[in-house]
Image: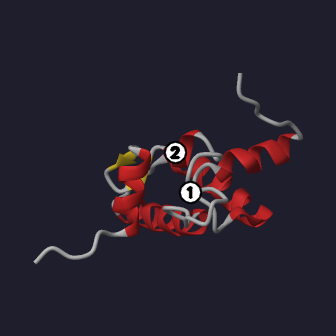
Amino acid sequence: MVGKPRASDERAARTGRHLGGGYLNDLLDPDLPGQGDGIPSSFALKLMLKDASLIEKFAVSLQSPIPALRVVEKNLASAVALGFGTENASAVIKALEKEAGVEVKAR
């Protein structure tokens, strides 16, 4: 039996930007659908931070460090601390802008 399409499926069809569980617009443009238009973010920063922590613990258990993960965790933790925890990955740019005191503008 075919069930009701998930909201993410409908969004993917509407935007044409679904990429295997994530949305291209999560990293490209906070003004695309899904940001501020009543559509929930596809994966909240606070959950990304939790997952990064789990990945780090797993890597430590395998004695296989992932140095770049520390940078990712720092940026995610900073964005969450600045109040962007419920937003998607595009909010990392907002946090970096706030920390640097600049605004990234489209060309």
Give the image quarter of residue 88: bottom right
Quarter of the picture containing the N terminus is: bottom left
Quarter of the picture containing the C terminus is: top right
- Relative to the observer, which residue lies in front, 28 or 3? 3
Give the image quarter of residue 73: bottom right
Mark 2 surroundings: few (<14), some (14-19) or many (≥20) residues within 10 A: many
Classify residue 83 as left or right of residue 43: right
Residue type highlighted by circle 2:
Asn
Residue that badge 1 annotates: 34
- Relative to the observer, which residue lies in front, 88 or 101? 88
- Disc 1 + disc 2, Cβ < 8 Å: yes
Mark 1 surroundings: few (<14), some (14-19) or many (≥20) residues within 10 A: many
Count the labels in the image.
2
**What residue sits 37% from the left and 66% below the top?**
61
Decide: is 101 above or below 6: above
Where is residue 82 shown, x and y percent of the image? 79, 62
**What residue sits 50% from the left and 63% below the top?**
43
Which disc, if any, is residue 25? 2
Classify residue 8 as left or right of residue 102: left
Which residue sits furthest right?
A: 101
**What residue sits 55% from the left and 67% below the top?**
40
Decide: is 100 above or below 5: above
Which disc, if any, is residue 89? none
Q: Distance between the residues labelled 1 and 2?
A: 8 Å
Where is residue 30 shown, x and y percent of the image? 64, 47
Give the image quarter of residue 63: bottom left
Classify residue 11 as left or right of residue 69: left
Classify residue 83 as left or right of residue 54: right
Element under disc 1: loop
Residue type highlighted by circle 1:
Gly
